[in-house]
Image (cartoon, helix red, strand yellow):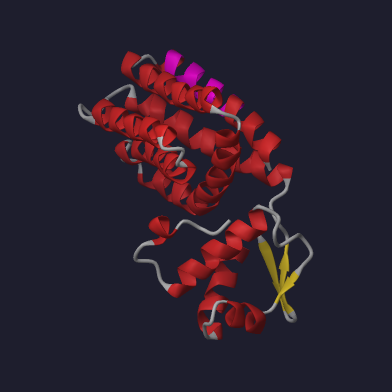
Amino acid sequence: MHYPSAWLQGSSLGEFIVSELRLQIIDGTIPPGEILSENRIAAQFSSSRSPVRDAFKTLSNEGLIRLERMGAVVLGLSAKDMDELYDVRYLIESFVQENLAKQLPHDLMTKLQQIIDKMELSMKHSDFVEFAYQDLQFHETIIMEANHTRMLHLWKSIRQIIMTVLLLTTEEIFSQGTERIEAVIDKHRKLMKGLESRDEMIIAKEVKCYFSDSRQTLHKTL
């Protein structure tokens, strides 16, 4: 699989390289322990070494590789790493959603419903790439609407890995048939209903259920 070009519109060569390497590391095409050299990756992407060097720095900051003198050692994404990523996602979303209960933006439900409509359309067209993108948009919209600078900063620090993991898990979900895809859409509807209730206890329950199920899907897929 290659990273969807529609997701990378306007991206620089360095951003394209880091996205492709991230995907190949997370899906196991580039296994843990492999050594990546700047020269080899530059040749592979027909680029100079500078964007590759920048890509390596980004992947190192994300914990996917370790920089050493002879090159970059691939660390990969372990089950523990994924659990920790979803712990962070859960902390962010439980916080922002419970905060939104106090003052729900008047157009948030409309925005979220429009995203769910697009998810349903993606399901009808068997387009897992668009579905994954809309899934990401659903959660990002909620986080953005919370208007919490530090939580948004925390989200952005894991966003690229989450996007890549979501792409891979969504492809697997689509292979399981319409019923499984509809179950994912229904999980998002429940998050919406939780927010609509403006009840912090109901919201907390729905967010917990959502991430418990998502974590199981993650471990079955990757």
Q: Is residue 13 left or right of residue 164?
A: left
Magenta stretch mostly in which secondary structure? Answer: helix
Residue 194 in the image: above or below residue 172? above
Any part of residue 62 in sight:
no
What residue span does the magenta drawing correspond to? 202-212
Closest to the observer, 150 or 178? 178
In the image, 74 versus 21, the foreground residue is 21
x%, y% of residue 145? 30, 37
Residue at 79%, 64% (x, y): give it: 33
Give the position of the C terminus as an image quadrant.
top right
Give the quadrant of residue 31: bottom right
Residue 137 visible here: yes
- 160 in the magenta segment: no
Which residue extends farthest left? 106
Quarter of the image where one finds residue 202: top left
Q: Residue furthest right?
A: 33
Please state the horizontal and vertical placement of residue 185, each as a whole percent of the image.
45, 26
Residue 63, percent from left and from top? 64, 58
Residue 109's place in the image compared with 198, above or below, is below
| Placement of the N terminus among the 4 image quadrants | bottom right
Q: Residue at x 32, y 30 (%)?
A: 117
Would residue 116 be found to the left or right of residue 127 on screen?
Answer: left
Q: Nearer the viewer, residue 196 or 184?
A: 184
Query: Whole-percent x and y of residue 188?
Result: 43, 26
